[in-house]
Amino acid sequence: MTVTEMPVTDRRLLVTGGAGFIGANFVRYWRGARPDDTVVVLDALTYAGNRANLDGLEDSQCRFVHGDINNTELVEHLLRDEALNTIVHFAAESHVDRSIEGPDVFVEANVLGTLSLLKAARKVWQLEPASTGQTAIAHRFHHVSTDEVFGSLTHEDPAFTESTAYAPNSPYSASKAASDHLVRAWHHTYGLQVTTSNCSNNYGPFHFPEKLVPLMILNVLHGRDLPIYGDGMNVRDWLFVEDHARGIERVLESGELGETYNIGGCNEWTNIDIVREVCRSVDERMAARPELVERFPHTPAAVGEPSETLIQFVTDRAGHDFRYAIDASKIETELGFQPATDFETGIKKTIDWYLDNEAWWQAVFDGSYRKAA
Ligand code: NAD
Ligand code: TDX
């Protein structure tokens, strides 16, 4: 189908999964950069969703709706009643280890949830058959995906480009790949104005402490083992989360409809090196700020030990992808996007955020943020 571009001028956003790690950082960034835009966050508040991630952001222009993307009627109602013209779709089950333990919810949230959104968007934005006589409403559906859909690289392989064949290996990445294909099909078949971004591993504030970087920071602070899967030589490409938000902004502003854009940090690290870096960085802070040792008496620095002594090599993740790497030249050359935060700065900001926001992660650990939601 030929798709005529209908540019969105006055942006009114539905941000799905906006109470999760990247979604909340995106809303935070967007509210700062474009305070006049309307933002409605739709989030089911699963174990990973946290209303506190949006603290200080909600006002007359930005509101939170507790609900499931699989509730198509609710999505239609929000799009229609609030005249929303842009969906930025983050909502998903996102943790690979959980997908290995229980894949069903990944298909429900990531595949069926995306289908539900696509159906609602097509209906409310009036992309029903021409015979209905309706004129389509200007809109954009931006789908947030991952580099994991491309599978695993060896050391020698070139980085993933947008034309790398899909080869998902985990239930998580398979569900994300399926959602990417649905989004593509809604563009080609029904003319939905879509863009997709496939991003590498993010790190930064509000990251749920089941994922590598926050888990290691908090385990160091508590003097707990640092579990490294396998030999720790698996490679990931790390991007500061605010740069992901900026990359999506560029795609929303200037991305070509139906196109996909890789977003990455050009910043490959083995897991063991990332963990050593976290250990070094925390130890540096402990040395510079004695009050931290009083707050965290179980951290190795409290007894003059390096945090690296906590490293434990444990059983590998099933089907563990060896290496991800993003070739981000398309978004750089076509949309002029480059990450703004280098890794050294980003990891320091992240560690400082966890040190300064103990109430946030204590509430995550004791579940009180869920009781309050
Ligand atoms: P997250 O797990 O921190 O947050 C996911 C959010 O989605 C949570 O707030 C959760 O409550 C919500 N959610 C889940 N199912 C829902 C449903 N059915 N209806 C409504 N809300 C629902 O995940 P994240 O790390 O912020 O990832 C966000 C998106 O970015 C995901 O689509 C993920 O695949 C993608 N992504 C993540 C990374 C990364 O490094 N974390 C990298 C690339 C792409
Ligand atoms: O305890 C751990 N020990 C360990 O060695 C954990 C939690 C992870 N790891 C390894 C597995 C990975 O090689 O660290 C690497 C990173 O693991 P995760 O933080 O679980 O991220 P990953 O599996 O790479 O997936 C992440 O990036 C892509 C996000 O969770 C996905 O949502 C995103 O799509």
Image (tube, grey):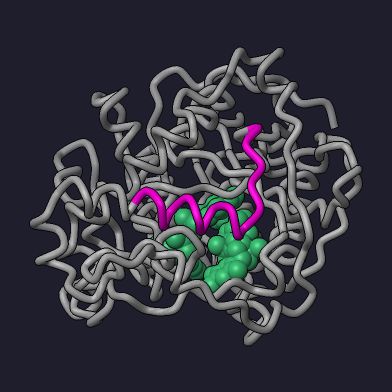
Would you place residue 51 above or below residue 138 in this image? below
Residue at the location (50% across, 56% down)?
276
Residue situated in front as seen by the camera: 353 or 184: 353
Prevalent SS, magenta region? helix
Q: Is residue 235 left or right of residue 1?
A: left
Please report the bounds of the magenta region as a residue range.
266-281
Residue at the location (38% across, 33% down)?
12
Would you place residue 78 above or below residue 227 in this image? above
Q: Percent position (x, y) of residue 340? A: 47, 23
Q: Percent position (x, y) of residue 38? A: 30, 34
Q: Percent position (x, y) of residue 134? A: 62, 34
Quadrant in which residue 194 is drawn: top right
Q: Is residue 165 left or right of residue 70?
A: right
Quadrant in which residue 305 is drawn: bottom left
Residue at the location (25% across, 24% down)?
36
Residue at the location (63% across, 86% down)?
102
Quadrant in which residue 264 is drawn: top right
